[in-house]
Amino acid sequence: MTEPAKTAATLDSPPPDAAEHTSARARRVIWLLLAAAFVLILNETIMAVALSKLMHSLRIDASTAQWLSTAFMLTMAVVIPVTGFLLQRLNTRPIFIGAMAFFSLGTLTAASAPGFEVLLVGRVLQACGTAVIIPLLMNTIMTMVPPAERGKMMGNISIVISVAPAIGPTISGVVLSFLSWRWMFWLVLPIALVVGFIGYRQIENVGEPKKVPIDVFSVVLSALGFGGLIYGLSRIGEGGRTGGGSHSSPVAMWIALSVGVVGLVVFVWRQLMLQRDDRALLDLRTFKAGNFTITVVILLICMATLFGTVILLPIYTQQVLHLSPLSTGLLLLPGGLVMGVMGPVVGRIFDRFGPRILVVPGAVVITVIMFLLTLVDEHTSPYSLLAGHILLSAGLAALMTPLFTAGLGSVKPELTPHGSAIVATCQQVAGAAGTALFVTVMAIQVAASKAAGAGQAASLTDGVRAAFTVGLVISLLAVVGAFFVRKPPEAAESTAH
């Protein structure tokens, strides 16, 4: 067989339940996807500390600069639901090549952008590629990895999801200390091109595509629903971060939220109708698996808590404790690294003992840390925050891999592409919702404290404590749900044998 023919061939290894170990070819595909996902997620977070420099360089205000993050999230929200269709309709190889091409083109466009408008287009193109990779990676693992080894493989995803966002702001801070903002993209571009070229030469197709129709009306409803919801939530978060609280652009915010809610309601109704004939854009029959539903709910709670905490801690450390941005980035770095180191270990424990031994202690740890964060004041030691963030990250690490694996493993194989897209979509919505919730609660309390005569630092401390109190309440729901997470029957049987 010639090299091109070999590359384009479909993996013909036995189905997961018949194989004792993941084939070498499947591992190669998964590691290529992991490398791509790492680069793409790293890019998503390096923008976090660059907005102020971009404002000065491009001569734009804060509300305009925030669109570089908002447009990225909006594009992700619109594209991810469509990946369920793409994963069924197309082979792995063209999806991967297309995603890396979009991302590389977007990175080149952003790096060479003469002004804000072209930079925004570059970020949208980057988001189109990023939105596809994680669902593709999850679907590949659930398709090609035997049930008894899925925890370990999902643990590798945890490394990508946790380490890349953790080191992104730190790398960005170092780059911006010595170079212009364009180098954040110029340094990423060759890495993306190398990963894309290796994938072009080496990646092989997983599974067999099938002809499935796409409902254009569902795509429009998905864009209006998820896009409107995330845009509205992001407007709340942007307002709070810039001092405007929930009163920033209230008309646009409420219109977006209303469009989002109505769009989602009609979208759900449309999918319930279409799935009767297997034509749904996102097949909601995945939620008939009770284990999947429980894990998605807990994931929503965890992602909302994680994003809300990640937003609040830098505000608190810089404006109350007066730490520099670089010191704040270094303070948050160890927690992300801990999550990465724990990923494979947690995966092996899941494969052997199931999810409950991990998710219950993980949820408890998160709840305890959220309680301790409600006690911060103007004199809290940064080292206490460092220890708390590391423990919080350890708790999240104990939850993420088991939830991904148990949830997707409980879905019927033919619905796995839809399950992967639903999980990725929920992550985006939960991140935006968590940010909006925490920032809004903080802003309301800050205003109340200032009205009562408190100073700036004291008011902000009160606001942070109030937001973490809300985080504590919702984390208690995760503790309750953790007791109901079970190992998928298929995986339990494989472990027993």
Image (cartoon, rainbow, N blue to C red):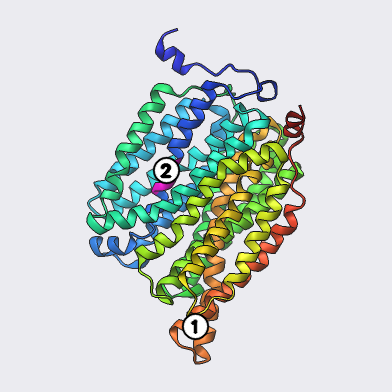
Judged left or right of residue 3, residue 115 is: left
* Residue found 61% across the figure and 48% down from its top: 400
Q: Nearer the viewer, residue 356 or 222?
A: 356
**Label 1 belongs to which residue?**
459
Q: Position of residue 294 (x, y in %)?
A: 72, 49
Residue lying farthest top? 1
* Residue found 50% across the figure and 67% down from its top: 385
Q: Type of residue at label 1?
A: Ser
Q: Position of residue 436 (x, y in %)?
A: 53, 65
Q: Which label is found at residue 471?
A: none
For residue 332, above or below residue 410: below
| Residue 218 in view, yes or no | yes
Q: Where is residue 429 in the image (x, y as percent from the top left)?
A: 56, 54
Element at label 2? helix
Q: What stretch is highlighted in magenta?
A: 38-43
Are dots 1 and 2 in contact, CB under 8 Å?
A: no
Judged left or right of residue 286, residue 170 is: left
Label 1 packing within 10 angstroms: few (<14), some (14-19), many (20+): many
Of callouts 1 and 2, which one flags the residue occurring earlier in the amino acid sequence?
2
| Residue 229 in view, yes or no | no
Q: Which label is found at residue 40?
A: 2
* Residue found 49% across the figure and 92% down from its top: 453
Residue lying farthest bottom? 453
